[in-house]
Structures are given as C-alpha cells and as structure tokens.
Image (tube, grey):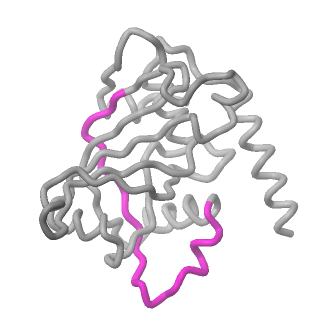
Amino acid sequence: MWARALLLWGAAVAVGLSAGIPPHEEAARVARFVAHSCDWAALATLSAQEPPMRGQPFANVFSVSDGPKGSQGSGVPYMYLTALEVSVRDLQVNANASLTMSLAQTSYCKRKGYDPQSPLCAHVIFSGLVEKVPNGTEADFAKTALFSRHPEMASWPRDHDWFFAKLNITNVWVLDYFGGIKTVTPEEYFNAVP
C-alpha cells in the first residue's frame, strides 16, 4: 500500500513540475507554483531565547503544505507545530515571521542545471503572522494537506500537544529571474491560478 502511495505521489510531483513553472512575467502564479511544489520551508523568527540570541534572527526548517499534491492548493502555508519547538516559543512572544521556499528542494532545478542561488531556481519569501488554526473546517483541511504529504506526522507523540498553524501572509516576494526581486500583493497571490 505504501509503495503504491509513494508511486502515485511521485507521479503527481513529476506531472506538476513537468507542466512547467509559469512565465516569470506572472510572479503571482510563480509564487503559487513554488508554494504548492515545496514540502518544507525555512521559517525565520525573532529569537526569544536567552541572551545572546534574544532578539536575533533565528531560522528553522518546517514541513509545510498548502494542499494535497495533485490539487491546485490553497496558497496558505500550513504547519504542524508544538510549543516544545524553540521557534514556536519565539512565535509565542512575537508572531511575526518570514517563510522561504525554493524549487531547489524539488527535482526542477537539478534537471535544469540551476544552482539553488540562481534566480532561475525560483524561490518565494512570505512574511506575516503565524496563527493557530481554530478547530473546524480549516483545521480539517490543514490536517489533510499536511498528513497527505507528511504521513509520518500522524504518528508523532500525542503528548507533545501538536496543533495546526498557518502563516497569515501580509507580504510576498518572488525571485524567479534575473533583474531583482518582485513584490506581489497577498490579493494577487491568492487570486492567481498556479
């Protein structure tokens, strides 16, 4: 069963990436494409740890999903968090964060021969507030989105009090071509079809 699911997941990834990244002139579509293609991201917070780290930037890797593979995705980066995580403790003091995703984590850039730092290896940077997703329809969607891509999450220790969270996006920057970063409004981002 797992082998079949893995095969289907791999086929969905290959189809999505082979369909191609949207044209670089359509930055909002590129941002949605990157967000849906990536399974993890670097989340940067302002550290609430003891000095000398307090108030300093602190980046950490988290599994993310904006929807199951094969779907269009919601554009909302969902995460599965616990207060035991150091970055979550930072967020409890200051919920502002940035989240970076890059196609370098997919096969796209390697197939094209793009270095991860190359603008052609598209990446997107979001900023906003990390918020707990309230129980209900959105939490159900977040669970489906995350557990379909990260099935191991379903077996993580229950005594860690896991909860679903999302980045409430206030700013979007896209780097997908030479000439500098592009700004996309949240409205443009959510209205774009990847």
Residue 70 as seen in the image, left or right of residue 161? right
Asked where in the image residue 186 lies, by quadrant, the reply is top left
Residue 177 on image: x %, y %: 47, 14
Asked where in the image residue 92 lies, by quadrant, the reply is bottom left
Q: Is 186 placed above or below 115 here? A: below
Does residue 73 show up magenta in the picture?
Answer: no
Residue 141 on image: x %, y %: 51, 61
Residue 157 as seen in the image, left or right of residue 164? right
Residue 57 as seen in the image, left or right of residue 142? left
Quadrant (top left, top right, bottom left, bottom right) of the N terminus: bottom right
Count of picture labels:
0
**In this view of the protein, which residue sits in the foreground, 56 or 27?**
56
**In this view of the protein, which residue sits in the foreground, 62 or 22?**
62
* Residue drawn at point x = 25 percent, y = 70 percent: 89
Start and end of the magenta stretch? 150-173
Q: Is 47 placed above or below 17 here? A: below
Q: Is 95 placed above or below 112 here? A: below
Quadrant (top left, top right, bottom left, bottom right) of the C terminus: top right
- Residue occupying the far bottom of the picture: 159
* Residue drawn at point x = 40 percent, y = 41 percent: 100
- Residue occupying the far front of the picture: 52
**In this view of the protein, which residue sits in the foreground, 119 or 8?**
119
**In this view of the protein, which residue sits in the foreground, 15 or 159?**
159
* Residue drawn at point x = 47 percent, y = 31 percent: 123
Residue 174 on image: x %, y %: 40, 26
Residue 176 on image: x %, y %: 48, 20
Does residue 156 show up magenta in the picture?
Answer: yes
* Residue drawn at point x = 23 percent, y = 63 percent: 91
